[in-house]
Each structure stands twice: as C-alpha cells, then as structure tokens.
Image (tube, rainbow, N blue to C red):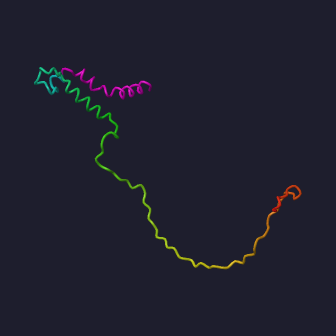
Amino acid sequence: MKNAVFIVVFMLLARPVMPVLEYILNYDYIVKELCVNKAKPQMHCNGKCHLMKELAKAAEKEKPASDKKVATQQAEVLFLTSTTNYTFKALPVIFTQKNSVGYHNLYTSLISVAVFRPPVNV
C-alpha cells in the first residue's frame, strides 16, 4: 500500500520532468525523425526544438483552469418559484374620542421628607 502511494506521488511530482526523460531516452529517434531543424545541421539543434514543444505542452496542461480564458458563459437556474398576486383591501378607520381623565399621581417615593428639603424660592 505504501509503495502504491509512493508511486502515485512520484508520478505527480515527476510529471513536468517527463518530457525531459523522454528526450533523454529517445534521443536518437528524436534527432533523426522528429527534429524540425534536421535539414539545418549547422544549428546544432539535436532535437531541442521538439523538447521545447513538449515542455510547452506539459506547462499548458499544468496551468490551472482559472488561468485559461473561457470563451463561453453559462447560466444555471438553481430554483424557480412562482409569484402570487396579493391584493390589499383598505379597512375603514374609525376615529373615536377618548375622555381625558387628567393627571394621576401613580408613583410613590421612599425618600423621607425630614432628610431632604428643597431650597425655598425667594
């Protein structure tokens, strides 16, 4: 089990290096068959042009999806509710006169009169 996990992690980490390993292992085939500049031996390309193309492809695959520009826009309808029509009725307002009874002293005080005496107005 540990070996399988190790192999999977190694493959994920080695993924950007895979084109270089492929270039090293298949050097003769790439130089003779896949090299773009094989007609120009004075450039001493030796298949590096093919390696650069493969590295560019690998880098493009490694880019996250957010870096790539999306040409289409999609709209999703998550839910749909139907609306209902409400009608409001005006209720009649009835004004009634209230009899004002006046002021009632509805509180008490615990303060003793002998202790507190307000000043006298002169």
Left of 51 or right of it: where is 110?
Answer: right
Q: Which sits in the foreground, 116 or 58?
A: 116
Residue at screen point 63% across, 79% down: 95
Q: Residue at x 13, y 24 (%)?
A: 38
Residue 112 lies in the magenta stretch = no
Residue range corresponding to the magenta coloring: 1-28
Return the residue found at the far left. Answer: 39
Q: Could you tell whether 25 is left or right of 111 in the image?
A: left
Quadrant assignment, res 104: bottom right
Q: Main secondary structure of the magenta part?
A: helix
Asked whether residue 24 is drawn in magenta, I would say: yes
Residue at image x 32%, y 50%?
A: 73
Q: Residue furthest front?
A: 122
Q: Is residue 99 left or right of residue 33?
A: right
User: x%, y% of residue 32?
Assistant: 15, 23
Residue 7 sits in quarter: top left
Looking at the picture, does residue 14 appear above or below residue 60?
A: above
**Residue 30 location (% of width, % of height):** 19, 24
How many numbered marks have been drawn onto this rendered protein structure?
Answer: 0
The N terminus, quarter of image: top left
Query: 54 or 68, which lies in front?
Result: 68
Observer-nearest of 54 and 108: 108
Q: Is residue 58 left or right of residue 87?
A: left
| Residue at image point 42% right, 24% down | 3
Residue 37, image x, y percentages: 14, 26
- Please tell me in which quadrant of the rendered image residue 110 appears: bottom right
- Residue 122 drawn at (x, y percent): 82, 62
